[in-house]
Amino acid sequence: MTLRKIAHLGHPILRQTARTLTRDELLAPETQRFIDDLVETMRDANGAGLAAPQVYESVMICALEVKKNPRYPYKPDIPLTIAVNPVIELLTDERFDNYEGCLSVPNFRGLVPRATEIKVSYLDRHGNAVAHEVRGLTAGTWQHEVDHLFGKVFVDRVVDLTSFCTWAEFERYQMAGFVERAKALVARYGS
């Protein structure tokens, strides 16, 4: 496995729609090695997820995992999930304001309205079709990562530009209130 360099905001690859993969491409040894690299890079950076374009590969693959993440102590655990060619269907008009950051936009946060309930459909890393519903903060994590596959970064979805802040100022002025709202969302949805 190899740690990959993470692309930062401004690099053109973050604005491209990634290419879908065939099942044969997915199962190829080089793609499986890439998935291992993606997971290792995400874990090394303490990310809750990482999409292939963020490591300079414009293919429809993202990884998600939250396991006692020090950057996001308020997020519920997400088992390691590899999503290939994911599709999101919104199940509600209800939104919550998610204070998001991104490994491709270091040291920056902003409020993004995210759907509270979604259905995700994708292939796992072995080419098996998967579909399930996701709610709460975990739904926000999914939406954030899948956005990357379509050339979107969280800063594109911030509605109130005055919510932008550095990580230090988020911790100082916004984190306590956001964590309270996040815990209420987790209590409501269990995720």
Image (tube, rainbow, N blue to C red):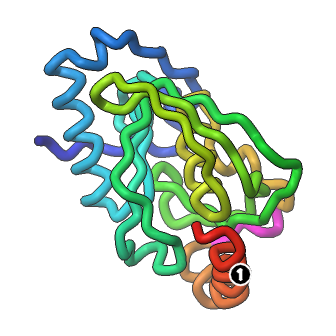
In this picture, residue 63 sits left or right of residue 139: left
Residue 64 drawn at (x, y percent): 42, 50
The amino acid type found where label 1 is placed reads Ala
Residue 162 drawn at (x, y percent): 82, 68
The answer to which of 46 and 114 lies nearer the viewer is 114
Based on the displayed image, in which of its 4 quarters is residue 140 positioned?
bottom right
Residue 87 drawn at (x, y percent): 60, 29
Image vertical order of residue 27 relative to residue 88, above or below: above
Span colored in magenta: 161-165
Image vertical order of residue 22 relative to residue 184, above or below: above
The answer to which of 51 and 115 lies nearer the viewer is 115
Classify mark 1: residues with Cα within 10 Å, few (<14), some (14-19) or many (20+): few
Q: Which residue is drawn at 61% across and 52% down?
A: 134
Image vertical order of residue 20 relative to residue 129, above or below: above
Q: Residue at x 68, y 50 (%)?
A: 155
In this picture, residue 19 sits left or right of residue 30: right
Quick check: is 7 in the magenta stretch?
no
Q: Name the residue under label 1.
A: 184
Q: Is mark 1 on a helix, strand or loop?
A: helix
